[in-house]
Image (spheres, coloured by chain):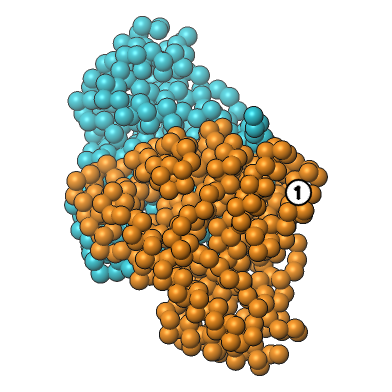
Chain colours: A orange, B cyan
Amino acid sequence: MMSYRFSDRMRRVPESFLGELFRVSNDPDIISFAGGLPSSAAIDVEGITAAAKDVLENEGRRALQYTNTDGFLPLREYIARRYRERLKIPATAADIQIVNGSQQCLDLVAKILVNPGDPVGMESPGYLGAIEAFSLYEPEFHGVPLGNTGPDPDAFAALLSSRPLAFFYGIPNSQNPSGTTYSDTMRRAVARMCEDTGTLFYEDDAFGELFFDGKSRPPVKKYAPEHTIMSGSFSKIVAPGMRIGWLFAPEPIIHEFNVAKQAADLHSNFLCQMILHRYLETHDLDVKVRRVAGVYGENCRLMCDLLDDAGLLHTTPSGGMFLMATLPPRVAAMDVFSAGIREGVAVLPGVPFYVNGGGEDTIRLNFSTATEEEIHEGMERLVRVISGLA
Amino acid sequence: MMSYRFSDRMRRVPESFLGELFRVSNDPDIISFAGGLPSSAAIDVEGITAAAKDVLENEGRRALQYTNTDGFLPLREYIARRYRERLKIPATAADIQIVNGSQQCLDLVAKILVNPGDPVGMESPGYLGAIEAFSLYEPEFHGVPLGNTGPDPDAFAALLSSRPLAFFYGIPNSQNPSGTTYSDTMRRAVARMCEDTGTLFYEDDAFGELFFDGKSRPPVKKYAPEHTIMSGSFSKIVAPGMRIGWLFAPEPIIHEFNVAKQAADLHSNFLCQMILHRYLETHDLDVKVRRVAGVYGENCRLMCDLLDDAGLLHTTPSGGMFLMATLPPRVAAMDVFSAGIREGVAVLPGVPFYVNGGGEDTIRLNFSTATEEEIHEGMERLVRVISGLA
């Protein structure tokens, strides 16, 4: 009988809810507010099909062969141009590396920057996928409480002044899980503090295109370009199944990142890179994104109204796909999770989002996947579950 | 001015030739024997295009959405069935995890098994992509000389008996870079030795379908199923641009591997998984593979004949895409590389394939990419370069 020995880093991975969530999201009897899927209705299947035919019929032999690690140059040029036009920040294709969805940035950025025991700063609550990816590099996590306008300024300043961090990771736009957006004052303060202390800010921008008002917010990258690594993704604005995201970072970081990317998987799937680029070339992404954000905005308002009706405290996002609600006293989120599954509604307990503990009375709710009718029905079930536990 | 600090592991990555090689492979004036591309002519663009249309038109919304980390179940079932039918070894979908090309197995297997300083065994010469991927987990490499029928049995036994390895990595079928195939005696000996010492054997089987005689060889996995992790890839037999490979391993390994895969990039691109499965369902892979292997066999024989004519020693592969040649006394492979680029022929120096040094007088030659005419012309240039240096 063989006994297998695993590396020490594997013991650091927190118990994951994501596998359980994918199972739940396939059960037709359960209305899920627990996952993080973009609306399937928002995926332009016809447009992508046409782009796929075009690429395969005209450049199929190239699209199906090996390519370079950096990614498809015209796609990187598109991304850089969009940064220049949408956010008014300088960017060229040389600053962009294509990855398998922006989750891969979390893995590879930690790989190139984190030694075991290195301090890594994060928002608290922080993104679960980031906690999982970083954990494998055995950092010492330091959570900074996230308020309504960004990380607590005093705690943030104290952390950055106290020790050299490998980096601070944050999601300034419509954060996952809280839905919080940093104020412009906070963005400038974060940038200044990073410059003053020589700290790298890892700005995960998965949701920057999904503000309900259709307006963009200036990224921290704009105020501290040399101190900011930015990641982006087409998963929330075109289609997640293609797994195309990117890193946008200063040259020395891109260089090391490219070495790590090559060792990790040589390159991202080229066929999808070419299909995606063809699609973007022939469609107006802004029109599409405004429509998606509009629907998410209506869903979010509905969910907030129903939470208000039930007397539950919650964040009030201005974009993205998630909000957080606070449970009544003595109601534990884990109990709401378990009872919810039995009643046909899935929510995500807040606990795993807190690297230094806390959040026992919080749940994360997704408003991008369910329809209006499902939100009504699911929230009714959820309120019933919570009342039963109170 | 920001100064960036990188993790210690980044200092372990050997200088890579792969980036340089992709550049060389795009220069029309250079005949490249240095890369590792499968023949573009062998990619069934029409068949894959039809499969892509079918998937996108009938199940596009599903194919473009997020999915689970394991991979597309029908594709995993296809892979398992092929193991049962082709190699007569037991396998089910539960034993298979889909990855972004089998290079990702190298990264994630090392991630779950290797602590810094752990001994890892490898063939010498060994696969460069594996050396790069493993290096980032800071192992202590132990190379075992590779002979014509597999690793030197005494050195192999001595290494496995001397200390507990994280694993021993090998390519028993048409190895990259040497083209060597283990004898059946050696496969059984490797299996027995791994069982006797509780060692994991990482059996990279990128080329097992590409024997020129069309016959398969029993894998080490057959003789020591609980002690063998196997990886496979569609890159060499269908199309590399889709980046679809897999790990086939005992359940405890698959479980940890899945955790690491989820943290690394959530899942592999789903659109390509579905397209590939549709293609495999509607085409006879055996017919296609036999045709490709036949062409590679002819190319290989031609290259061996031309090396014989020039009086250069070389390995004589029975499959795969690579062979190794030995240079005349006092001719250094690095000089052949540099002079070759100037003369319009690219080869890969053997040095980076040797984890404990050596190989200064060896070059790796690829015979899958070039046409017959290009092999004639390229070998003429190469012989001229070597004569000029001798």
Count of marks, rendered view:
1
A175 displayed left or right of B186 = right
Front position in the image: B312 or B368:
B368
Residue B38 in which image quadrant: top left
Q: Position of residue A381 (x, y in %)?
A: 55, 89
Outermost residue toward the front in this view: A185
The residue where tag 1 is placed is A157
B30 displayed left or right of A261 = left
Q: Check the image and report above or below for A31 versus B103.
A: below
Q: Chain of mark 1?
A: A
- Secondary structure under tag 1 reads helix
B90 displayed left or right of B379 = right
Front position in the image: B176 or A170:
A170
Q: Check the image and report above or below for B160 versus B244.
A: above
A127 displayed left or right of A355 = left
Image quadrant occupied by the C terminus of chain B? top left
Q: Is residue B166 visible in this depiction of the protein?
A: no
Q: Residue at x 53, y 49 (%)?
A: A218
Image quadrant occupied by the N terminus of chain B? top right
Q: Is residue B321 visible in this depiction of the protein?
A: yes
Q: Position of residue B98 (x, y in %)?
A: 44, 58
Q: Residue at x 81, y 45 (%)?
A: A162
Front position in the image: A273 or B51:
A273
Residue B33 in which image quadrant: top left
Q: Residue at x 48, y 86 (%)?
A: A376
Q: Position of residue A109 (x, y in %)?
A: 59, 45
Q: Residue at x 66, y 47 (%)?
A: A190
Crowdedness near tag 1: few (<14), some (14–19) or many (≥20) residues, C-alpha within 10 Å: some
Q: Amino acid at mark 1?
A: Ala
Q: Position of residue A320 (x, y in %)?
A: 50, 64
